[in-house]
Amino acid sequence: MNESLPTRIQRVVLDSLRTILDLFFHRGKTGAVLRSLLGVVSLGLYWTAVTVLTGFPALLSSAWLEKIPFPVDLILDLGASYFAPDVLLFVIPVLAGYWFAMRIGAHYLADLFELESYRIGARFLRAAILGMGYDTIEISTREGLELNPSSPLQRIGGPGYLTVHLGFAVVSETIDGLPRVYGASKEKFLQGFERLREVVDLRDQLRKLDEIRTVTRDGIVVYARDAQMVFRVYRGGKTSTLGQPYPFDENAIRKLVYGQAVLDRGSRKWDQQLPSLVRREIQQFVSQLSIEEFLALQPEYPSSIETPDPVQPSAVIHIPRSELTARFHTEEARERLQKVGLELDWVGVGTWEIKESNARTPSSSSPARTIINTWQNLQRSAIYESEAHLKRVQRRSYQQYSGQRIREWIGAWDEPAPQIGYRKWRTLRRILDHLESMRRGLTGDPDYELPLNYDEMLKYLREKVGSLELGD
Amino acid sequence: MNPVPFYRRAGFRTVLGLLIWLGLYLFAIQFTGIEITWRPILIALMIFFGILLVSIAVVSQFILPVRTLSERFNSFIRLLDVFAGLRGPVIFVENGEAIEAFKERERRGAGVLLIDYSSSAVLRTETEFRTPSGPGIVFSAPGERLAETLDLRRQARLIRGSTPNGPGTSSLDNPTLAMTQDGFPISADLFVSFILDPGHTSSPREGKHPNLPPYEFYPPAAERAVLRHTYGEKDDIPWTELPARLMVDLWREAIKNYSIDNLLDQSKGAPAALDAIRQAIHTRLSQPLSSEITSGGVHRKTSREYMLLSSRGIRILAVGISNIYLPEEILAERALLWCESWSGEVDATLNQALKKEVAAGVEGERQAYETLATTVTEKLRQSLARGEQPKMTEVLSGIFQEALQLSNQRDLVADGPVLAQRIREILEQLAAPDDDPDRTTGQQNG
């Protein structure tokens, strides 16, 4: 499109003006040096011009100057002229004007950013305009940004210096809103109005969740206790070395910082992301299982359980780590974590607990007590049904009965008797009773055949015992 | 808070500073031969105000992040207004919140809004709203003031449930209280995540691009959020509260289509009811065509909730339902049912096992009968089979000898060695000559 001459001239003038202004008001060190230089040179030239135009008014007495050798007296005389009242009359308004303008600017900044003191604004302007007294922030802890409430760099933004210690990264936004990530570095220069957003700890983090309430799909409440996790900022596959012990992926840091949700009580910190995720994952894991499926994950108790423990107020169950932690180490889980800028090293679920219900009466069952009793009963029935146990019981019963009978015969012999004959008869009588009882017990089994002449023997013994009774 | 003493206030110190400069000037003028008239003072004032003007022009370029010619000029004018006492509201908007002094918005001069990159703002006059402004500098005209600030970041609200206390439980105590189809109160932890509509349906930017600001600003969404700002009886309802309220409402609507048993369906393979409810709620909040949630399935229709949120510039990102809370009585009842079904089978198995154990004991005893009956009577039966008539002592000796043999066999008799020792003693006594009644009787019977 053809522009008219005036328009073209206007455009060129504006572009030139824009360029000059951008150069003069550059927010970096270059602009500050230029402005300082121009300011000092301008002031110097003006001051000199005033001094010259007023004819170098004398300030020091000539008598005193005569005592000073040349050329020092000349330099002193000329130098003192700069501070003569005739000259200062024209310099003081300049300095006052400059001073007042800076005060107004500092007050404005204090008003805009609600600064506690206008001095913060004044320091900022001195650094920004003249490059004098750049502020420095050192980040060596997670709370680095909160430790410098009176720093202009913290409250307003650059220019200034940022030093980030090993193990940390800092996210900032430039004047155009572009996010920047600074790893460990010394005195990195931040441009004008570059604002610090967040400090990220690059080291491995351990977090704990003391108690997580979960509910199985059939409504039983189970608590997970002492869940722990070790995680860190996603490193993008980089390995740590001595020179670079905490590598990081810039993309991950940005996602971590800018992806945090704002809750009703304030913004959530990035290091709370994974504990929340673990909590949700554990709750989801349990909610997909019925209590029986959940308990089926528990390892078997050892067979040495003897008697049940006294009733406990809660049942503590150990679920093998692999069942739940496997969920966090799948490819899908890994990608999900990478999307938010994290990588997980390890997660431990701790113990699971089923508490007693408050509505339970003393005699009513509860999942907690039932779990203990039922698992013990399950183990007991496995033991009782085992071949080895049954053989042991059979053998013990055999031994006990045999021993008991023989002991009774011996007891019959040992009982006090008036004479040996009576003792013998009593013992035989006892043996006969037992042999008859055995006969009754054995004849109940249709497959069993009595020993040869057993009945004849019993008849003989009856006659023996009976005849002696009659004889007695 | 204690008021700042006047001598510590910045304004006092500035005036004091000016007086000091004036004092220096008057002090200097005394040493010159110049008469103190209007002329020198006027010259001084001209120099002062000239330099002041130039300095203000320079300083004004550094109090705001100005970049364009227009912004530079406006910043200069704003600082001049401060000098002239015509200052308007000067507000910094950070993370969706206005950082302002008390009664800042009541100033009527031309003002400035500095909006950070996670915020946006809308100005207004007495009678109308202005176009929403995104991150950056906004120079407000006289009479314009800040209407509302908006947070561009992702928001999340967690509404915690609690155990319903039974009949008469109020939703004031339990914000997620709902009633099942069969009248049981139930509660859960509800979670909703949302954002001011970024103007597209893909995932929000949130710092993913290094060459773009971290958050997106979509003016129509901000406009809708402000225009449809809701007000309660006593206070206003910020836009960030609406999604949580809708979430609770939909949760209650969904629950009333389920009985308690359907909700806690433990059949294997059946999809968890809460998961189905969550998905349906998410669809209803984030899609124009929604799902009606019933226990029989999902039916499609236009979503009022989506329209409500969309008309306020809100986009739902995620919803979650977890941690169901049942009344204690229901929990106890379900626990009892589970206990009985869970332990019943195991109890039956245990009873069977105990019976087997008893049977093994009986079998052992029976075997003992057999052994004793056969072994201890062996000699006696053989004697009788040969036609002999052993005497009592011989009978007893025979029996005890067999018993001794049994006791000496390892693990056949309990306390075998002890009994064997005793039996030996009895056998010695039996072997000793004595007054044998059998011998006497045998002689009598002949």
Image (cartoon, coloured by chain):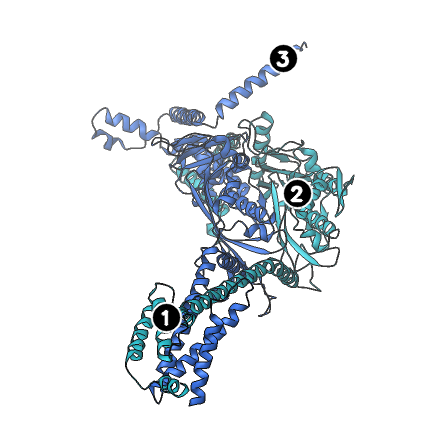
The furthest residue to the front? B446
Residue at image x 61%, y 13%? A9
Residue holding disc 3: A8
Can the viewer see residue B238? Answer: no
Q: Which residue is nearer to you in this view: B144 or B8?
A: B144
Q: Are marks 1 and 3 on the same chain?
A: no
The furthest residue to the right? B301
Q: Which residue is nearer to you in this view: A294 or B213?
A: A294
- The type of residue carrying mark 3 is Arg
A186 in relation to B357, above or below: above
- Real-space CA distance between mark 1 and mark 2, rounded to the nearest whole angstrom: 107 Å
Q: Mark 1 belongs to which subunit?
A: B
If the image is split into quadrants, where does the C terminus of chain B sit? bottom left
Taking B161 as reference, is A26 left or right?
left
Q: Give the drawing colour for chain B.
A: cyan
- The type of residue carrying mark 1 is Ala
Residue holding disc 2: B148
Q: Give the drawing colour for chain A.
A: blue
Q: Tell us which disc is closer to us: 3 or 2.
A: 2
Q: Mark 2 belongs to which subunit?
A: B
Taking B301 as reference, is A421 left or right?
left
- The type of residue carrying mark 2 is Glu
Q: Which residue is nearer to you in this view: B282 or B306?
A: B282
B39 in relation to A469, above or below: above
**Residue B398 sits in quarter:** bottom left
Q: Which residue is nearer to you in this view: A361 or B139?
A: A361
For mark 2, does the 10 Å Cα neighbourhood hold few (<14), some (14 to 19), or many (20 or more) residues? some
For mark 1, does the 10 Å Cα neighbourhood hold few (<14), some (14 to 19), or many (20 or more) residues? many
The percent position of residue A115, horizontal first and vertical second, equals 50, 44
- Real-space CA distance between mark 3 and mark 2, rounded to the nearest whole angstrom: 42 Å
**Residue B132 sits in quarter:** top right
The percent position of residue B307, horizontal first and vertical second, equals 75, 40
